[in-house]
Structure formats: structure tokens, C-alpha cells
Amino acid sequence: MSKNLVPIKAVKVTIAIPEDAFPWKIVPAPGTPGSKSQMIDLTLSYDEGSTISATIKAPNLQRVLAAKQLASGGYLVFQGRLADGGRSMMDIGVVYQPPRPSAE
């Protein structure tokens, strides 16, 4: 089998984090002085020791926290591109994925 090199500009990833695994206490309350421009640094751990650094805007997490209040039990979904050889994420967006209703 021959190998064919295909150049790409970036690797984009999606990471789902269960809401109960996220440290909500680090998210400043809306209206807190400086929270509109605050950046929150996270270290995402996987495979028992591997990590990815991520920095996200506090207002994005505040919106997710508000959505979580409507339907708990879901996931935070981070989307961004890998940088630094896969050691960090950049240009991160985050949404809240509520749990799906069970089919009865």
C-alpha cells in the first residue's frame, strides 16, 4: 500500500465533557467586574496523563452555565483547532448539549 501525503492547514477537534466533570466554581458570575474580558485557562486530561491546554473566554462559559440550568445532565462541547503539536487548543467555541429525552 502506498502512502499519499495530503497537506492540511489545521486539525480541528471536538471534545465532550460531562457537566459534572467540569469545575463550575471557576466561572465568574455574570456582571462580576472584569468578567467580560476574563480568560479561563483549563487543562484537559485524557489517557491517564496526556493533557491539552485550553483558554476560553469567561462569557462563553457563563452562557453555557445558563443553558445548563434549563436542562442538567448534559455535556459541554468544546470545538477548536489543535496547536503546539497537539498540546493546546485554539479558537475555542463551547456549547451545552442537553441530555436527549429517553424514548419510552
Image (spheres, rainbow, N blue to C red):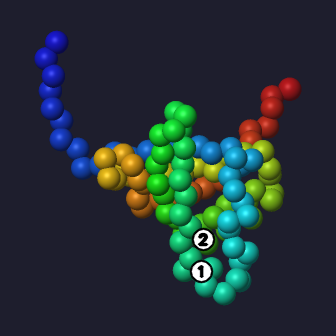
| Residue at 68%, 66% in the rendered image | 26
Query: Among all residues in the image, which is located at the extreme bottom?
Result: 33
Cα–Cα gap, marks 2 and 1: 7 Å
Residue 7 x/y as whole percent: 18, 41
Helix, strand or loop under label 2: helix
Q: Position of residue 43 (x, y in %)?
A: 53, 53
In the rendered picture of this protein, how many numbered marks are placed on residues? 2
Q: Which mark is residue 2?
A: none
Q: Is residue 37 left or right of residue 67?
A: left
Say which element carries label 1. Answer: loop
From the viewer's perspective, tell me whether residue 55 is left or right of residue 86.
right
Position of residue 100 relative to residue 52, above or below, is above
* Residue on which the image places disc 1: 36
Quadrant of the frame with the N terminus: top left
Name the residue rendered at 56%, 67% in the picture.
Answer: 40
**Mark 2 neighbour density, 10 Å: few (under 14) some (14–19) many (20 or more):** many
The disc placed on residue 58 is 2
Please state which amino acid type lies under the numbered disc 1.
Lys
Look at the image and tell me whether residue 69 can be seen: yes
Q: Residue at x 81, y 32 (%)?
A: 102
Q: Are marks 2 and 1 in contact (CB under 8 Å)?
A: yes
Which quarter of the picture shows residue 4? top left
> Residue 5 appears at what percent x and percent y?
15, 32
From the viewer's perspective, tell me whether residue 50 is left or right of residue 22: left
Relative horizontal placement of residue 64, taking residue 10 as reference (left or right): right
- Residue at the location (71% across, 77% down)? 30
Q: Amino acid at mark 2?
A: Ala
Question: Can you name the residue that lies furthest to the right here?
Answer: 104
Q: Is residue 99 above or below residue 103?
A: below
The residue at the far top in this view is 1
Q: Is residue 59 above or below residue 18?
A: below
